[in-house]
């Protein structure tokens, strides 16, 4: 018995050591997707992944286009030291809608930054909608979100992000940590949208009337599809939600944007979805159909 016990100890240590090292350094995960249009139908032509970041089976609730995909991070949350990277290539004439199955949870970091880097490239007459569920930033989380969208002359992009500082459902206050967010959109290499945020619990922007006004949820919805028609813009301006939040829309020559600042991530999603139903017939040439995963 003593011999067996001593022989097992080195094996146990060999198994545990990589796991301990992984916990100390965090997880690196990447997913690369290439969509193509073949016989007037968008298909996932190639996917490559490393680590815990995958895409579910492509669905077609709207016919041949757009293809619907759900991006999944199986651990369910992102810890300090974790790095996620998503790369999406939309070939000519292809069309896709990508979302997530639930909120992305950013855990307390223990001094290490957690990051997410997204790069989306859309070729001629391609279209990509990036409509994820909200980000929940736990107290003590150190988070960096970076997104870059590269558009050809006739490409279309629509995407939103909703951020909740602290776990509001459990009454948690975001009292420590750091949050960084950056979105760049380029058309034919020319910068058409540059948005960034750098927040910590002591940031004056959290309390400023020109900032978050002591609210804990903020979000933006951006569409890059050329000049927004006046009637579409007016219809979006007429959309109301029953809330004390501040929200509204504006339009630039190549960008439509909407913002929400308020107390509730669900409100932000309701508002953005109402806008999406109004906007999609313009930029996508079809009515909006909710991804099935949103009903679960």
Image: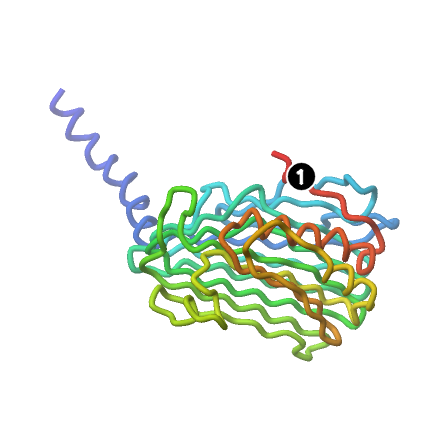
Please name the residue that numbered disc 1 is placed on.
Answer: 57
Query: What is the secondary structure assignment of the residue under circle 1?
Result: loop
Q: Nearer the viewer, residue 158 or 53?
A: 158
- Looking at the image, residue 295 lies above or below residue 95: above
Q: Please provide percent x and percent y for residue 124.
A: 80, 66
Residue 245 appears left or right of 203: right
Residue at 42 percent of width and 60 percent of height: 143
Q: Nearer the viewer, residue 234 or 259?
A: 234
Q: Nearer the viewer, residue 151 or 262?
A: 262
Q: Nearer the viewer, residue 140 or 233?
A: 233
- Looking at the image, residue 12 lies above or below residue 123: above
* Quadrant of the rendering where the C terminus is positioned: top right
* Quadrant of the rendering where the N terminus is positioned: top left
- Looking at the image, residue 93 lies above or below residue 250: above
Residue 261 appears left or right of 179: right
Residue at 75 percent of width and 46 percent of height: 67
Question: Where on the picture, by quarter, is residue 205?
Answer: bottom left
Q: Please provide percent x and percent y for residue 54.
A: 57, 45
Q: Please provide percent x and percent y for residue 43.
A: 76, 47
- Looking at the image, residue 136 lies above or below residue 153: above
Residue at 75 percent of width and 76 percent of height: 253
Q: Please provide percent x and percent y for residue 221.
A: 64, 61
Q: Dot 1: few (<14), some (14–19), or many (≥20) neighbours within 10 Å?
A: few
Residue at the outermost bottom position: 190
């Amino acid at each position: 018995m003593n011999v067996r016990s001593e022989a097992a100890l080195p094996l146990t240590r060999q198994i545990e050591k990589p796991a301990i090292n992984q916990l100390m350094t965090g997880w690196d995960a990447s997913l690369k997707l290439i969509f193509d249009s073949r016989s007037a139908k968008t298909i996932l032509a190639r996917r490559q992944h490393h680590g815990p970041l995958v895409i579910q089976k492509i669905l077609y609730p709207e016919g041949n286009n757009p293809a619907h995909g759900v991006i999944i991070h199986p651990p369910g949350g992102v810890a300090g030291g974790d790095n996620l990277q998503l790369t999406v290539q939309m070939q000519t004439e292809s069309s896709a809608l990508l979302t997530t199955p639930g909120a992305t949870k950013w855990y307390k970091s223990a001094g290490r930054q957690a990051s997410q880097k997204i790069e989306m490239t859309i070729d001629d007459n391609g279209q990509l909608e990036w409509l994820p569920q909200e980000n929940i930033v736990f107290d003590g989380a150190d988070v960096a979100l970076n997104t870059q969208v590269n558009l050809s002359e006739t490409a279309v992009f629509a995407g939103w992000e909703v951020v909740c500082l602290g776990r509001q459902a459990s009454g948690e206050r975001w009292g420590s940590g750091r949050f960084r967010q950056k979105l760049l959109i380029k058309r034919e290499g020319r910068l058409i949208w540059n948005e960034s945020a750098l927040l910590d619990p002591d940031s004056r922007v959290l309390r400023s009337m020109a900032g978050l006004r002591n609210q804990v949820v903020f979000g933006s919805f951006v569409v890059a599809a050329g000049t927004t028609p006046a009637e579409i813009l007016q219809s979006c301006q007429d959309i109301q939600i029953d809330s004390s939040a501040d929200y509204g829309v504006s339009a630039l020559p190549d960008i439509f944007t909407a913002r929400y600042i308020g107390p509730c991530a669900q409100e932000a999603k309701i508002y953005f979805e109402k806008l999406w139903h109004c906007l999609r017939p313009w930029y996508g040439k079809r009515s909006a159909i909710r991804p099935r995963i949103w009903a679960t």
